[in-house]
C-alpha cells in the first residue's frame, strides 16, 4: 500500500440516499472537490473512498461504484464499503427462497484488490435487553464511520480485508474515547489564544531587545558587523583626511607651545603665549575647513531615504572609504525565520516577538546622512567657544597642597625679631608679585586675567603667625635666615604649580580642549556616516522585512484575539453547540436522510429515517413533547437527498469527525462528542461497545495548545520566508501570509473541536514531544494500555452482526484479523504501562496519527459460499421506487436487473 502523507484524506459518501446525484464522473469529482476544498486539501493523488450502503445497494448502485473505481487520479483508488442492515430476504429470479442474511451479492466492480467490504448487519448499540435501537442506529453509525475515516485505520482495515476470502468481513469493535468536556476545551482554547497573542501594551516601543549573542549569524553580521568597520574610514590622500591632518597638526603644535608656556620662562617671556595663540588660531581655521567637508559629506550621504550607491560614490570623491558588503545580506530571510522560531520556541507571545522585530529593524536600519546634519551644531564655532572655560583667563580652584605650602613658606619666612621683622614680608611679597606678573602675562585683549587670592592670603597669614612666634620665643638670627631660605623654596614650588594650573586653565579658555573635542567629534560623525553606508541596501531590506514580520505578527495576534472572543449566545431552541460559525450545520440537510420505502421518488419528504432515532439537545418549550412537534426536517437542497458527502470536508486527514463522517453536525446529530446524548446524563444511549473517559484538563493543557498555535503560525509563515529570500517581501506577500495565518488559526480551532486535544495539530514541532494524557486531559493512559493489550478473545469485542448474520460467519477463531490501535501521542505511555505490568508488547499495534479513539477491531470473514460475485446487466427501463427501496431519489435512472448463475467459479 502507498504510504500516507499529510494531504491524505478519506472522502465519505452515503449511497443510501442521493445516489442519483452521482450518476456522472463529473458529479463524483464535484462531490470530492467540495469535501476536500472545504477541508483546505488539494486533489488527492491516492483517493480513499469510504462508502456507506446497504447490501441490496451493492447491485442497485453499480453505476456509482464503477464511477468511483474509475476515478481519475495519479495513483491507486481505494474503496472501503461499509454495509449496514440485512441482505434481501430472497433472491429475485431464483428457485430457492433464502432467509434474511443468507447471501451477499456484489457486482464484479467491487471485486478489485483495492476494494473491501465491511458488513455490519446490526450495530448492536443497545446497552440493555430492554433497549430496541434499530440495526443502523445513527448514534452508533456516526462513531463507526468516524473511526473508519481515520486514514491509518482505513488503510489498515483495507489491508487486512485483502488477506480474507472475498475481501469481506463482519466487524467487531471495542472502543475507548478520551476527551474533555466542551466548556473545558473551549476555555482552554481561549486561554491558549490569549497567551499566544500576548497583551497589547498600546505602544510600539520595544520592551526587550534580543542580545547580539542570540541573533542568528546573518542578522548578527548586519547589526554588529558594521561597528567593527569604522576604522580607516578616511583615505590617506583624500581631501577629508588632509583637512583632518592639518587641524590635528595645528593642535599638536599648540600642545607643544602649552608645554613651554607652563614652565617658568613662559611666566617671564610673552613670546611663548603669542606662539600658542597663533597655533590655536590656525587650528580654528583648519577646523572650519574640516567642518565644511564634513557638512558636504553629510549632505551627500543620502536624503530622507536610505543611503544609495550614488551617495556612496560622492563619499568616495571626498576621500571616504565605504567597505564592501561582501555577503552580509545573503541570508536575511533565513536569519529572520530562525529568530522568529527561537523567540516563539522560548514561549514568547506574538506581540512580544513583534516588539523584538521592531527593535531589530531600528538597530539595523541605515541612517541617511541628512539625518545626522543636526549634530554638526554640537561641533560648531559657537559650541567651541561655549565649551571653553571662559573667554579670559580664569584661575582654577587652588588645591589644598598649594595653600599649605604658601602658609608654611610665610610662617618660616616670618621668624624674625625686631628690627629684622621686615624680612617676614619677603614671602608674601613674592606671592603678590607672581600674581601680578602671571595675570598680566595671561592678559586677553585689554583685560588682565584674574588670579587666585588664596595663596597670597595664606602667605600673609603664615608670616603674621611666624612673627608672633618669634616675638614669643626670641629665636636666633641664624634660625630666621634658615627659615627664610626654606620658605623661599616652598614659595618657588607653590608658584610653579600655580602658574602651571593657570596656564592650563587659560589655554582651555582659549580653546585647546574644545578644539580637540570638536575635531574628534566631527571625525566620529564621519565614521558613523561611513558605517551607515556599509551594506546599506542589505540592512534596509532587513529592516523593512523585520517590520513586515512585526506587522504580520501583530495581525496574527489580532486574529487570535478575534478567535478568543466569546461566541454570541445562540437563541433558545437553536439545537446543538457547534463552535464554528461558518459551518452553518443547523441549516444543512441531514447526513442520514433517505427516502421512505413507500414514498415516491423526488417527493417532498425524503424519508429522513435518521430523525426517527435522533436526539434533540434543545429544551422543550411550554411542555410540548418531541412527538408533538411539526415535521420540519430539512430536505436535500438538490432534491435528491444529502448523503454523507454533502458539504462535508472539514479536516479529513487527521482523524475522526465529530458529527457523522466528521462533517458539520446536522440537526439530527450533535456537533461533537461532548454534545452527544451520552455526554451528560444520557449514557444509556451510547453504544455498548464505546466507553468514554471525560477529563477536566491537565496542568499542561493551555501551554501545549499555545505551543501548537505557535507552530501553526510558523507553518503559515513558511511561504513568506521564501518571499523574503527572493526579495519579494512586499505588501502582497504580507497580506497573503496574514490570510493564510487566519485560515490556519481557524483550521486549528476546527482541529481541536473535531479531533480533541490528544491529536497533535497538522503542524507540530518535530523536536517537541507532546505531553502525556495526564498533562493534557487529566486522565490516565492505563485504560488505553489495558484495552489495546487485551487478549484476542471473542469477549473482548462486540460483534456488529445480527443473530441471523452470525450464522454466516466463519467458525475458525484463527481466521479473524485483529487490529489494535491507539493515538500515536500515547505510544510511549502505553508501551511504558505494558512494560510496568509485565504484559507482552503488541507487535502489530497501529499508532494512529490522530484521533480520540483507542481500542480493538476484529474482522471476521464470512463462510464460503455466502458472497456471490455477479455481473449485473442494465436494462433501459425505469424504476419508480429504485430497487428494493434503497436507491431513494433515483427517479428516471436505468434500472439494474441482476441476472446471474451462482456457480463456484463466480465466487472470488
Image (cartoon, rainbow, N blue to C red):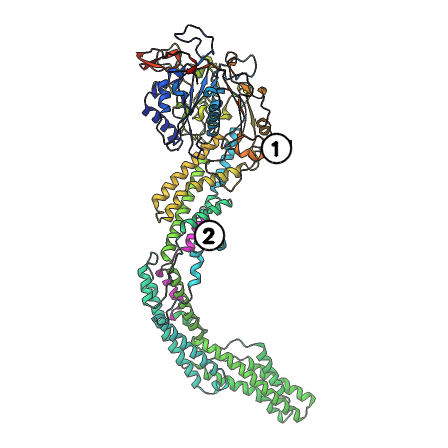
Quadrant occupied by the C terminus = top left
* Depicted 152 relative to depicted 240: above or below: above
* Depicted 291 relative to depicted 486: above or below: above
Judged from this view, the residue extending furthest toward the right is: 473
Q: Residues within 10 Å of mark 1 (few under 14, many from 20)?
A: some
> Is 528 on the left or on the right of 701, as rendered?
left
Q: Residue at x 57, y 80 (%)?
A: 402
Disc 2/disc 1 C-alpha distance (Å): 42 Å
Q: Which mark is residue 281?
A: none
The residue labelled by disc 1 is 833
Describe the element under mark 2 as helix, strand or loop. Answer: loop
The residue labelled by disc 2 is 216
Give the image location of residue 45, x and y in percent: 38, 32
Give the image location of residue 100, x and y in percent: 47, 10
Q: Is residue 770 magenta?
A: no
Q: Is residue 370 magenta?
A: yes
Amino acid at each position: 500500500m502507498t504510504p500516507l502523507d499529510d494531504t491524505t484524506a478519506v472522502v465519505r459518501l452515503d449511497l443510501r440516499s442521493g445516489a442519483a446525484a452521482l450518476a456522472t464522473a463529473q458529479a463524483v469529482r464535484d462531490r470530492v472537490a467540495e469535501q476536500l476544498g472545504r477541508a483546505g486539501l488539494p486533489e488527492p493523488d491516492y483517493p480513499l473512498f469510504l462508502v456507506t450502503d446497504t447490501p441490496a445497494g451493492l447491485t442497485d448502485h453499480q453505476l456509482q461504484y464503477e464511477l468511483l473505481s474509475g476515478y481519475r487520479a495519479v495513483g491507486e483508488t481505494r474503496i472501503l464499503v461499509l454495509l449496514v442492515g440485512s441482505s434481501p430476504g430472497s433472491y429475485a429470479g431464483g428457485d430457492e427462497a433464502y432467509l434474511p442474511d443468507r447471501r451477499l451479492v456484489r457486482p464484479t466492480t467491487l471485486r478489485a484488490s483495492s476494494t473491501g467490504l465491511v458488513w455490519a448487519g446490526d450495530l448492536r448499540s443497545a446497552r440493555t435487553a430492554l433497549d430496541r435501537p434499530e440495526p443502523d442506529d445513527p448514534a452508533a453509525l456516526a462513531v463507526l464511520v468516524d473511526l473508519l475515516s481515520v486514514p491509518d485505520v482505513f488503510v489498515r482495515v483495507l489491508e487486512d480485508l485483502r488477506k480474507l476470502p472475498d475481501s469481506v468481513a463482519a466487524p467487531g469493535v471495542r472502543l475507548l474515547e478520551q476527551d474533555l468536556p466542551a466548556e473545558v476545551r473551549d476555555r482552554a482554547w481561549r486561554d491558549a489564544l490569549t497567551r499566544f497573542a500576548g497583551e497589547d501594551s498600546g505602544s510600539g516601543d520595544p520592551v526587550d531587545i534580543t542580545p547580539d549573542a542570540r541573533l542568528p549569524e546573518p542578522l548578527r553580521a548586519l547589526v554588529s558587523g558594521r561597528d567593527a568597520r569604522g576604522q580607516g574610514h578616511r583615505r590617506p590622500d583624500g581631501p577629508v583626511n588632509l583637512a583632518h591632518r592639518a587641524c590635528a597638526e595645528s593642535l599638536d603644535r599648540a600642545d607643544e607651545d602649552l608645554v613651554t608656556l607652563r614652565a617658568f620662562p613662559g611666566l617671564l617671556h610673552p613670546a611663548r603665549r603669542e606662539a600658542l595663540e597663533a597655533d590655536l588660531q590656525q587650528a580654528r581655521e583648519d577646523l572650519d575647513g574640516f567642518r565644511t567637508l564634513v557638512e558636504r559629506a553629510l549632505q551627500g550621504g543620502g536624503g530622507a531615504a536610505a543611503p544609495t550607491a550614488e551617495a556612496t560614490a560622492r563619499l568616495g570623491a571626498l576621500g571616504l572609504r565605504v567597505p564592501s558588503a561582501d555577503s552580509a545580506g545573503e541570508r536575511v530571510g533565513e536569519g529572520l525565520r530562525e529568530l522568529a522560531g527561537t523567540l516563539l520556541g522560548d514561549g514568547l507571545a506574538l506581540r512580544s516577538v513583534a516588539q523584538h522585530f521592531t527593535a531589530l529593524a531600528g538597530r539595523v536600519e541605515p541612517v541617511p546622512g541628512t539625518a545626522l546634519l543636526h549634530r554638526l551644531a554640537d561641533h560648531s564655532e559657537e559650541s567651541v567657544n561655549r565649551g571653553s572655560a571662559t573667554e579670559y583667563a580664569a584661575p582654577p580652584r587652588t588645591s589644598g597642597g598649594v595653600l599649605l605650602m604658601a602658609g608654611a613658606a610665610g610662617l618660616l619666612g616670618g621668624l624674625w625679631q625686631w628690627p629684622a621683622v621686615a624680612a617676614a614680608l619677603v614671602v608674601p611679597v613674592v606671592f603678590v608679585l607672581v600674581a601680578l606678573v602671571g595675570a598680566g602675562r595671561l592678559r586677553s585683549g585689554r583685560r588682565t586675567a584674574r588670579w587666585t587670592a588664596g595663596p597670597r592670603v595664606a602667605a600673609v597669614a603664615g608670616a603674621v603667625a611666624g612673627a608672633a612666634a618669634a616675638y614669643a620665643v626670641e629665636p636666633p638670627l641664624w634660625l630666621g635666615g634658615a627659615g627664610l631660605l626654606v620658605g623661599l623654596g616652598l614659595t618657588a614650588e607653590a608658584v610653579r604649580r600655580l602658574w602651571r594650573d593657570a596656564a592650563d586653565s587659560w589655554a582651555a579658555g582659549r580653546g585647546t580642549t574644545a578644539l580637540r573635542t570638536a575635531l574628534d567629534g566631527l571625525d566620529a560623525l564621519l565614521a558613523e556616516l561611513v558605517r551607515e553606508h556599509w551594506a546599506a541596501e542589505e540592512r534596509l531590506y532587513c529592516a523593512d522585512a523585520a517590520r513586515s514580520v512585526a506587522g504580520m505578527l501583530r495581525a496574527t495576534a489580532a486574529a487570535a484575539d478575534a478567535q478568543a472572543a466569546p461566541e454570541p449566545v445562540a437563541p433558545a431552541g437553536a439545537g446543538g453547540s457547534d463552535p464554528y460559525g461558518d459551518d452553518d450545520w443547523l441549516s444543512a440537510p441531514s447526513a442520514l436522510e433517505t427516502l421512505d420505502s413507500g414514498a415516491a421518488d423526488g417527493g417532498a419528504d425524503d424519508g429522513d429515517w435518521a430523525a426517527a432515532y435522533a436526539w434533540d439537545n434543545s429544551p422543550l418549550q411550554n411542555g410540548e413533547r418531541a412527538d408533538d412537534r411539526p415535521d420540519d426536517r430539512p430536505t436535500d437542497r438538490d432534491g435528491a437527498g444529502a448523503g454523507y458527502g454533502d458539504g462535508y470536508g472539514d479536516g479529513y486527514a487527521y482523524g475522526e469527525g465529530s458529527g457523522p463522517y466528521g462533517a458539520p453536525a446536522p440537526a439530527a446529530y450533535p456537533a461533537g462528542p461532548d454534545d452527544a446524548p451520552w455526554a451528560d446524563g444520557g449514557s444509556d444511549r451510547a453504544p455498548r461497545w464505546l466507553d468514554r473517559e471525560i477529563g477536566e484538563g491537565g496542568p499542561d493543557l493551555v501551554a501545549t495548545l499555545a505551543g501548537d498555535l505557535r507552530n501553526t503560525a510558523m507553518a503559515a509563515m513558511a511561504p513568506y520566508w521564501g518571499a523574503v529570500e527572493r526579495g519579494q517581501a512586499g505588501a502582497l506577500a504580507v497580506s497573503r501570509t496574514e490570510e493564510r495565518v487566519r485560515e490556519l488559526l481557524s483550521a486549528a480551532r476546527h482541529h481541536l473541536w473535531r479531533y480533541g486535544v490528544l491529536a497533535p495539530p497538522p503542524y507540530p514541532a518535530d523536536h517537541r514531544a507532546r505531553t502525556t494524557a495526564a498533562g493534557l486531559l487529566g486522565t490516565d493512559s492505563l485504560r488505553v494500555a489495558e484495552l489495546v493489550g487485551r487478549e484476542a478473545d471473542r469477549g473482548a469485542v462486540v460483534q456488529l452482526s445480527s443473530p441471523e448474520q452470525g450464522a454466516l460467519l466463519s467458525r475458525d477463531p484463527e481466521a479473524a484479523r485483529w487490529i489494535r490501535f491507539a493515538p500515536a501521542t500515547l505510544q510511549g505511555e502505553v508501551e511504558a504501562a505494558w512494560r510496568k505490568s509485565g504484559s507482552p508488547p503488541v507487535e502489530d499495534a497501529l499508532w494512529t496519527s490522530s484521533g480520540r479513539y483507542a481500542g480493538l477491531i476484529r474482522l471476521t470473514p464470512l463462510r464460503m459460499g455466502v458472497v456471490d460475485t455477479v455481473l449485473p446487466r442494465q436494462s433501459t427501463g425505469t424504476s419508480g421506487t429504485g430497487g428494493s427501496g434503497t436507491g431513494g431519489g433515483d427517479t428516471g435512472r436505468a434500472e439494474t436487473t441482476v441476472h446471474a448463475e451462482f456457480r463456484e467459479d463466480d465466487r472470488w
